[in-house]
Amino acid sequence: MKFLNLKFIPQSADLALLIVRVLAGFTLIYAHGWKKLAHFNDTVAQWTQWGLNPIGVGPTASVALSGFAEVVCAALLILGLKARFAALVIGINLTVAFVAVHKAALTGDNNGELAFMYLLAAVLVLFAGPGKFSVDGRG
């Protein structure tokens, strides 16, 4: 029964923050941001067709801002460089995605569950900081 205590797993908030930063940042880049920027014109056309203009700056600026958050800020998050700023930008982006784009729905085909999970990771880093296993934590 001692196995169930999981004492063999080290308790480290810094390690947990590293894991959250790397996994959330990498998947945000890979699954979302890179596709937006690599196919920028197609994404803008799609957002225009869908009538997406979540913050009122037009589809082109919206895709650019979202791509910045999901690529540049996600990369900063992975490194733990200006991580709290990056987490804030990602958090704003994902709040807009969850509330305005996915209509705060956690059910259905185009639900905001994934946006909400990324938002949770961003809020965690925003309030806890990046931890000592980061560029910011080395100083």
Image (cartoon, rainbow, N blue to C red):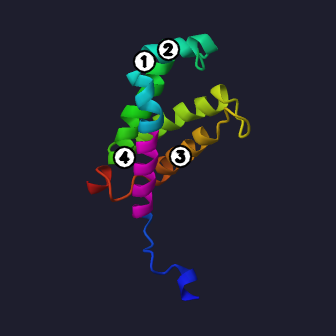
What is the x, y in percent for residue 61?
47, 15
Q: Position of residue 72 (x, y in %)?
A: 36, 33
Nearest to viewer (mark 1 / mark 4): 1
Vertical order, 132 against 58 (above or below): below
Residue 69 appears in the picture as rendered: no
Residue 21 relative to residue 116: left or right: left
Q: Which residue is mark 3?
A: 123
Dominant secondary-structure state across the stretch colored magenta: helix
Question: In the image, what residue occupies the spot 45% across and 61% down?
Answer: 16
Compared to 4, does 117 lie above or below? above
Q: Which residue is mark 1?
A: 40
Q: CA distance from mark 1 to mark 3?
A: 27 Å
Instruction: Evaluate if marks 3 and 2 touch, with contact meaning CB atoms under 8 Å apart.
Output: no
Front position in the image: 98 or 127: 98
Q: In the picture provided, is 126 more to the left or to the right than 116?
A: left
Disc 3 from disc 2: Cα separation: 28 Å
Looking at the image, which residue sits at the far bottom?
1
Tell me the amino acid under the disc marked 3: Val
Say whether disc 2 or disc 4 marks the residue closer to the N-terminus.
2
Does residue 135 lie above or below 105 as drawn?
A: below
Left or right, 103 with reference to 116: right
Residue drawn 45% across and 80% down?
A: 8
Amino acid type, label 4? Ile
Instruction: Answer with the quarter of the image where residue 41 lies.
Output: top left
**Is 94 part of what is drawn in magenta?**
no
